[in-house]
Every structure is written in C-alpha cells, then in structure tokens.
Image (cartoon, helix red, strand yellow):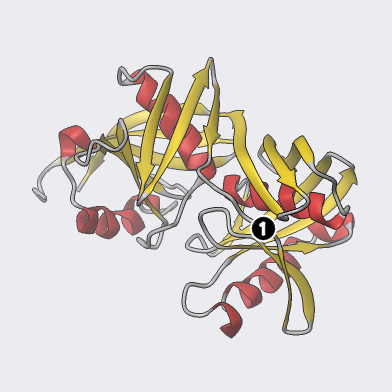
Amino acid sequence: MDKNATLSFTKMQGAGNDFILFDNRVLKLTNEELSALAPSVCNRKFGIGADGVIALQFDDSKEADLVMLYKNPDGSDAGMCGNGARCFALFAVTLGSPKKFTFRVHDKIYNASVRNDTATIAFPLNTGVLEQTVGGEHLLNIYTNTEHVVCPVQEPYLGNEPMLIEHGRALRYHEHFYPLGTNVNFIAGVDKNRLCLQTYERGVENLTLACGTGAIASALGWHHLQQGESGKFQYKVKVKGGTLSVQFSFDDETKQYSNIKLKGPASFVFKGQYYL
C-alpha cells in the first residue's frame, strides 16, 4: 500500500452500528493490509471512528456476486456482522449492484435484498440453542455464523451500562469460550414477539448501539425461553440504535432454527478521504 496515498471511504450506520466501507475493486487492499488499517481508521479520536471496516470486492471464486471482507476495530476477523452486511448491501447497490444479489463472507453465501433504505439479509444457517452454566451463570449459547451467548436479565439491568460492560467482558474472556471468546447479549422480554437487547461485542470490546447477529441470537433465545412451538415467526428486537426484525422458522422435532433473515434500516453518513 502506497503510504502517500489517500483512501476513499464511505461511512454508514445500521441501527447505530457504524462502519467504514471501501470499494476494494479499486483499492485492492489485501486481507493483511485491511487488518493493519482497521485499528487506525476505527479510532474515534485519531481516525474516522467506527465499529468495523468493510471492504467490497468481486468473488474470484465465482461462488457469489461479491465478497464482504469485515474487520473488527482491533483488526481481527469476525465470523459475520449482520448490521455490517445490511450496510454493505445498500453500499453495493449504489455502486451498480442489482437490488437482489449474493455475497460471500468467508465460506458462506448470503442473499441480500434492498428496498429503499431497508436491507434484508438471508443467512445460510441452521442452528440450535445450547443451555450452559458458565461461572455459575445460566445462559444460552447460540451460534449465528459467529459466536454468541444470550443472558436473560430484568429490564432495569439493561440501563446499568457500567455493570453490563463488566459482566459482558467477564463472559467474553471466560476460559470456557477460549480461544475465540464470544459476543455477549443481555435481553429482557417485552411480550411474546418483542424484546430489548444490549450487546457487548467482541473485537469492539464495549457495548454497541446494535448488533445484527446478536439480535438474531437473542430472538432465537427468547423463543426458546418461552418454549416456543414449531412454525414461522417474526420478532422485533429493540436496541439502543433502533429496532431490527428477525424472521425464522423452528422445528420442534429437530430443535433447529432455519430460514433466518435479518431486516432493518441502514443509511449513509458521509464520504471522505482518509490520509495514510
């Protein structure tokens, strides 16, 4: 990478989860260069500021239309970022992509659909809910193409952010989840199909205003806690940055969740040049 260069970027947010996006078809940053760049550009004091960095490029394997390369603010990889994927979908459309397309994250192919400022991402995912006791605490372990645990709490606890950060960090780094660690979701139910959520995100190492894969895990967890029946469902997940919709099917015989979709708003914040 030319150290005298400037990088054209677009800043976007989805329910308050904010990202820096690059058209990597032009920049041609390597995976290693993107990892090295992420901590500086995501820095909110000395950089642009974001919860993650996303690079868009063609899929050389021809398995999908595009590839989404995602990096956490510390430069590490994430299995998947749901809100980032929704921003990625709108970003791709502005670059000429059709409003329905496929994209690859690592070895998994996702379907994106864009309508106005709303993006829906269909996950290639069949998953279940594993009940665990970690450090004396009962929680739900739910894989949503990245690692998540769900902790049911009373609604007032969601407002105690210093405690949530301490609690989330302890679970995120608990030896039970070594070496990858986990994202930690604190949920409080509102009614049968609605819940509130606060997420401590691995890689960000703090609470974020929203987490898409965390919203999926939390919706499935809330269904499980209600001993939900088989069928198709749509849950509303309220986060600090807005409301996300999670659609899914559940089969009581296999105890598996499938046909999982994440839907919600995304918007452009600004464009600019980042001086290396």
Across and down, in percent, residue 229 comes to 85, 46
Name the residue located 19 percent from the left edge and 39 percent from the top edge: 60
Across and down, in percent, residue 232 comes to 75, 35
> How many numbered tags mark residues here?
1
Name the residue located 79 percent from the left edge and 61 percent from the top edge: 160
Q: In the rendered view, would you say 66 is above or below 107?
A: above
- The quarter of the displayed image where residue 152 is located: bottom right
* Label 1: how many Cα within 10 Å (few below 14, some 14–19, many 20+): many
The residue nearer to you, when weighing 255 against 56, is 255
Across and down, in percent, residue 106 comes to 35, 51
Residue hosting label 1: 128
Relative placement, left or right, of 83 versus 210 is left
The amino acid sitting under disc 1 is: Gly
Q: Is mark 1 on a helix, strand or loop?
A: loop
Across and down, in percent, residue 26 comes to 16, 33
Relative placement, left or right, of 55 versus 179 is left
- The quarter of the displayed image where residue 274 is located: top left
Name the residue located 36 percent from the left edge and 19 percent from the top edge: 94
List the single residue furthest toward the front: 253
Relative placement, left or right, of 150 versus 117 is right
Name the residue located 43 percent from the left edge and 18 percent from the top edge: 99
The residue nearer to you, when weighing 61 against 165, is 61
Decide if residue 159 is in sight here.
no
Decide if residue 81 is in sight here.
yes
